[in-house]
Amino acid sequence: MISNTVLLIMVFFVLLTLFSALAQVLLKTSANKVHPNKIMEYVNPYVISGYAIFVLCTLGSIYCYKTLDLKQGGVLQMSSYVFILVLDRLFFKQKIKLRKLLGMALIMAGIFIFYI
């Protein structure tokens, strides 16, 4: 049985994974824009915000790994693939093909099987 503390840390870890996926959306948004010069490609609000979120998520993950086993964190981290797929659809209107849906289903099944 998983204690309430561990369950809360697991939820926090998955939220950190979601925020990391959102940071990737910021970086991709910046990459899709035309910038006036090379410096502005790397020094703009999207890139700075994206990397700042990555740093905060990394620090949060380190905190979570004080409670979670390494294998638990690795399995929960796989949820990022699902988040990225959904966020790509929402923000960039990319089509979700059957092959990607099957891959996402396998990832979710793997996470579920790991915890039963």
Image (tube, rainbow, N blue to C red):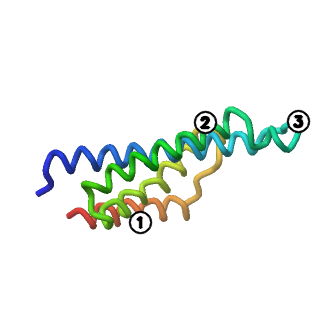
Mark-to-mark CA distance, 1 and 3: 43 Å
Q: Residue furthest top?
A: 45
Residue at the image position 51 percent from the left and 45 percent from the top: 55
Direction right: furthest residue: 36
Crowding at mark 3 (Cα within 10 Å: few <14, some 14-19, many 20+): few
The residue depicted at 37 percent of the width and 48 percent of the height is: 14
The circle on residue 7 is none
Q: Which residue is mark 1?
A: 106
Q: CA distance from mark 1 to mark 2?
A: 32 Å
Quadrant containing the N terminus in the rendered view: bottom left
* Residue depicted at 59% across the width and 44% down the height: 51
Q: Amino acid at mark 3?
A: Pro
Judged left or right of residue 27, residue 15 is left
Tag 1: amino acid: Leu
Q: Is residue 17 left or right of residue 36?
A: left
The kind of residue on which mark 2 rests is Ser
Q: Nearer the viewer, mark 1 or mark 2?
A: 2
Look at 57% across and 42% down and name the residue there.
23
